[in-house]
Image (cartoon, rainbow, N blue to C red):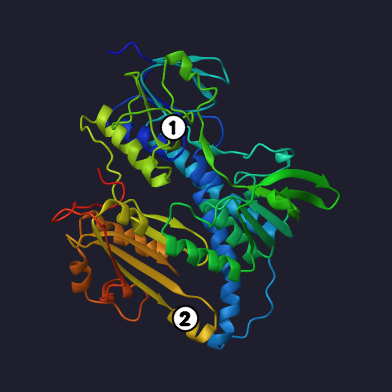
Amino acid sequence: MTDFDADLFVIGAGSGGVRAARVAAMHGARVVIAEEFRIGGTCVIRGCVPKKLMVYASRFKDDFEDAAGFGWSVRPPSFDWPKLVAAKEKEISLLSEVYRANLIKSGVRVEQSRAELDGPQSVRLCASGRKVSARTVLVSTGASPVLEPDIPGRGFAITSNEVFDLPELPKRLLIIGGGYIAVEFASVFARLGSNVAMAVRGENVLRGFDGDMRNGVRDALLRSGIELSFGVLPTNVEKSAAGYHVTLTKGARVDADQVLIATGRRPNTKGLGLENAGVELDCLGAIKVDAFSQTNIDSIYAVGDVTNRVALTPVAIREGHAFADTVFGGRPEAVNYEAIPTAVFSTPELGCVGSTEEEARAACDRVDVYAANFRPLKAALSGRAERTLMKIIADANTDRVLGAHILGEDAAEMAQLLAIAIKLGAKKADFDATMALHPTAAEELVTLRTRTARYEREVAGPEGPDCAPLGAE
């Protein structure tokens, strides 16, 4: 018998915490999970799910316009923002309750309360003040958007938390930032009817993505009517009767009805009592963990965005599952971060997996690049000025495919399937030997025979390194 109230106490019921709690309970552990807001975390409530619903809504604008080229007569459409917000809220509320029901069905006790560590194996429920002892504690509190830079009037701005529930669609929206969240909301709101401007600190959008794809997304944003300003930052936000006046570096001024700051996220570690247990944090405030998600305190683990490893929902879920199998299932597992697919849900969307060209050239002696830039079949009748971009990057010494990048319709779906092949170590010859499915955009991935470029280092060994996709261990 144990002297603890629970075998596992999970702080935070987001994707990673919920998965860890359910799997641990299935292994026979007595599990308690505490959540101060709504079960489901960022992904379900204020992230992936509501965002994708809004992406779908925004793309109907293009569909209505394209229909005429295919013989359809469509009455001038109108858009109802409150109706979309209400439909979105209904769906995420349903999902949140499904998450709760699945936890209870798995035998997990759910506490609707903020929870703080009171020691290495003790947690205090803030709503009641009651303390719960646990043999193991898992912190899965995620991350939150930040209002940066620290400038006068930044409190007038909103973040990606508030943007989903605005009372009305802004006629003029200024977005600060050029990462995937900024790009996605710019693309969405421009199609829903807002006049969108973006102020980006860097020289282009989507830092860290493949250079050609970054340029392709930038050009698509411009075609959508979005005003892009690079190399600038806001210096002041002022409230006015008509909205907000935003001053940018270089002296530019932008008027907007809403200002969305999308410049990054920070791990949710403040006020959790981590210092009471002696848990170590890194310079960004993230919880330090080892390959098995264990902190410097034997009884405390952490998964997901609060650890600042790979901030993606499926990664948090995988980490939570691996933690439960390791600690309660007797099957130690360290998560493999190789070849993680990711997507930017702009329109067109960007899907990618593995190394960018820039990363491959920095890591390998010889790199082969295969690229395609073509007009999709649908655009032949719709008349839309859009292009599909595809890129395959391979190690020229081993022929192993290191990365694949797609900008176009259904790019995310293609990237998910490509991740299987790349994770299995497929070679370019394997792609070439695969029969094409015609007519599809994806067939380009197996018919790209002509090398676009080969890059070689000036100093290289006789064979060079056996390169692996970005993130390979």
Q: Residue at x 69, y 38 (%)?
A: 151
Q: Is residue 352 left or right of residue 41?
A: left
Q: Secondary structure at mark 1?
A: loop
Check disc 2 and report the residue beneath it: 378
Observer-nearest residue: 130 or 324? 324
The residue under label 2 is which amino acid type? Lys
**Considering depth in this image, is 457 or 141 the residue closer to the camera?**
457
What residue is disc 1 on? 140
Q: Above or below — where is 19 with respect to 7?
A: below
Q: Secondary structure under badge 2? A: helix
Does residue 250 appear left or right of residue 133 in this picture? right
Q: Height in image: 365 above or below 70?
A: above
Residue 211: horizontal and vertical position, in percent?
43, 60
Distance in Å between CA atoms under marks 1 and 2: 44 Å
The first of marks 1 and 2 along the sequence is 1
Front one among 116 and 231? 231
Could one spot residue 50 in this view of the protein?
no
Residue furthest toward the front?
458
Q: Residue furthest left?
A: 462
Residue at the image position 43 percent from the left and 73 percent from the top: 388
Q: Dot 1 surroundings within 10 Å: few (below 14), some, or many (20 or more)?
A: many
Relative vertical location of residue 386 with respect to residue 156 in this rendering, above or below:
below
Q: Nearer the viewer, residue 436 or 98?
A: 436
